[in-house]
Amino acid sequence: MKIDVLPNKFEKSLRMFKKKVDEEGILKEVKHREHYSKPSIDRKIKKAAAIKRWKKYLERNSLPNKKY
């Protein structure tokens, strides 16, 4: 990854750097590798996230309750 810093444009270059780092998911990977987590814990976290997504989907696509 390379960012060219133009004279007197440090803030813009910093924003571009942050955007590229975020797009590539570097910080997410660093946080993931920071501590070891057991595979069973990883499965639980993924399952909980899937359940949360499913409930959110059902909530968005369900019919509204009758208010009469």
Image (cartoon, rainbow, N blue to C red):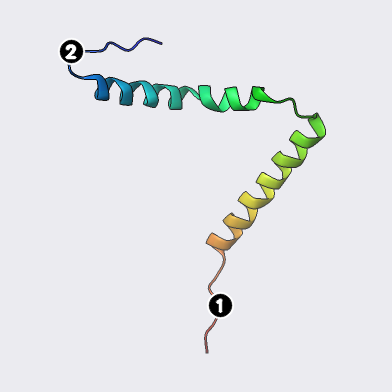
Residue 61: horizontal and vertical position, in percent?
54, 61
Residue lying at 60% horizontally and 59% vertically, measured from the top left: 58
| Secondary structure found at label 1 | loop
Residue 15: horizontal and vertical position, in percent?
32, 26
Q: Relative to residue 39, is residue 10 depicted above or below?
A: above
Left or right: 66, with 5 as reference point? right
Amino acid type at circle 2 is Pro
Q: Picture quarter containing residue 65?
A: bottom right
N-term-proximal mark, 2 vs 1: 2
The residue labelled by disc 2 is 7
Residue lying at 58% horizontally and 55% vertically, measured from the top left: 57
**In this orientation, which residue lies closer to the viewer: 31 or 63?**
31
Residue 34: horizontal and vertical position, in percent?
65, 24
Left or right: 21, with 37 as reference point? left
Residue lying at 20% horizontally and 19% vertically, measured from the top left: 9
Residue 65, numbered label: 1
| Secondary structure found at label 2 | loop
Residue 5, numbered label: none
How many numbered tags mark residues here? 2
Residue 60: horizontal and vertical position, in percent?
53, 60
